[in-house]
Image: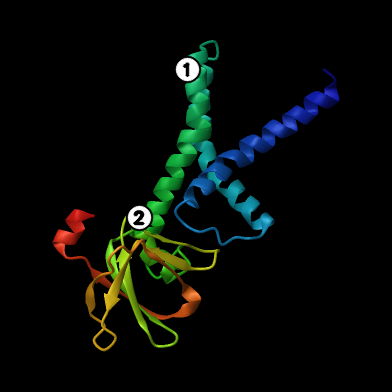
């Protein structure tokens, strides 16, 4: 192997060490929070910053693991710890801190109220007022789905409900309903109602 090839391998390994932990951490974080950083340069900076933060922990773990370089099992477990477990743990802790504890007026990482309310996955009856003034309703349960940023918002309700057009009250589930799909662009207002305890238990 030539010196040039060795140099190229060193560069690749350096990039992996500097970016991969941060890349994995942010990829896991963005499984829960939409990725609003669309510029490649901004993403790379985020990956690098996260990797720098993780470096002391990875360095300590690497020093310990390298003592057992001749033990394949321990070495493999150490690499798994450095490149998978620590970044994943960092992502989980960072998400918890940003969404549950460290608020204090800071911008919430979830960009839209639509994403926030449906991310709670709370079973509810939903009444939607369309832009033409009609009321439609349905059950948002465990088999329902709402799209999220950056895709266009729409919602699938697993059961359609009758809604009294005058009072806005539910008048029962539509017999034989397999659900309905509603686009956000067709909605002017969405209301959420808690499920009765017996309905919640049935779900």
**Few, some or many C-alpha atoms within 10 Å of disc 2 (few <14, some 14-19, many ≥20)?**
few
Front-lying residue, 36 or 105: 36
- Colouring chosen for the image of the structure: rainbow
Which of the two discs, 2 and 1, sits closer to the camera?
A: 2
The location of residue 77, given as percent across then percent down, is 47, 23
Residue 94, relative to residue 175: is it above or below? Answer: above
Relative to 145, 196 lies left or right: left
Q: Which of the labelled discs sits on residue 143, or is there none?
A: 2
Q: Quadrant of the N terminus?
A: top right
- The percent coordinates of residue 198 (x first, y second) are 14, 60
Asked whether the residues under the numbered discs 2 and 1 touch, taking CB atoms below 8 Å apart as contact, a structural biologist would say no
Where does the image place residue 97, in percent across and percent down from the top left?
38, 54
Which quadrant is home to the C terminus? bottom left
Above-or-below relation of 169 to 98: below
Q: Give me the residue at 53% from left, 33% from top.
A: 83
Q: Residues within 10 Å of mark 1 (few under 14, many from 20)?
A: some
In this orientation, which residue lies closer to the viewer: 35 or 129? Answer: 129
The first of marks 2 and 1 along the sequence is 1
Residue corresponding to mark 1: 74
Q: Answer with the quarter of the image where residue 51 lies.
A: top right
Q: Quadrant of residue 16?
A: top right
Q: Residue furthest top?
A: 70
Residue occupying the point 35% across, 55% down = 143
Name the residue at 54% across, 10% down: 70
Disc 2 from disc 1: Cα separation: 43 Å
């Amino acid at each position: 192997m030539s010196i040039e090839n060795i140099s190229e391998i060193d560069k690749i390994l350096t990039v992996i060490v500097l970016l991969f932990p941060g890349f994995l951490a942010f990829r896991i974080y963005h499984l829960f929070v939409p990725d609003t950083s669309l510029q490649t340069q901004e993403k790379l900076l985020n990956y690098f910053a996260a990797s720098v933060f993780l470096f002391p922990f990875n360095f300590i773990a690497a020093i310990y693991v390298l003592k057992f370089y001749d033990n394949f099992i321990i070495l493999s477990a150490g690499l798994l710890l450095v490149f998978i477990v620590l970044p994943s743990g960092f992502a989980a802790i960072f998400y918890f801190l940003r969404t549950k504890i460290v608020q204090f007026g800071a911008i919430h990482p979830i960009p839209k109220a639509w994403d926030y309310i449906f991310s709670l996955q709370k079973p509810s009856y939903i009444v939607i007022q369309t832009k033409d003034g009609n009321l439609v309703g349905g059950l948002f349960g465990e088999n329902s789905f709402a799209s999220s940023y950056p895709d266009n918002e729409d919602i699938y309700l697993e059961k359609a409900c009758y809604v009294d057009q005058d009072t806005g009250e539910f008048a029962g589930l539509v017999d034989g309903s397999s659900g309905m799909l509603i686009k956000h662009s067709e909605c002017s207002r969405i209301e959420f109602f808690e499920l009765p305890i017996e309905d919640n238990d049935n779900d």
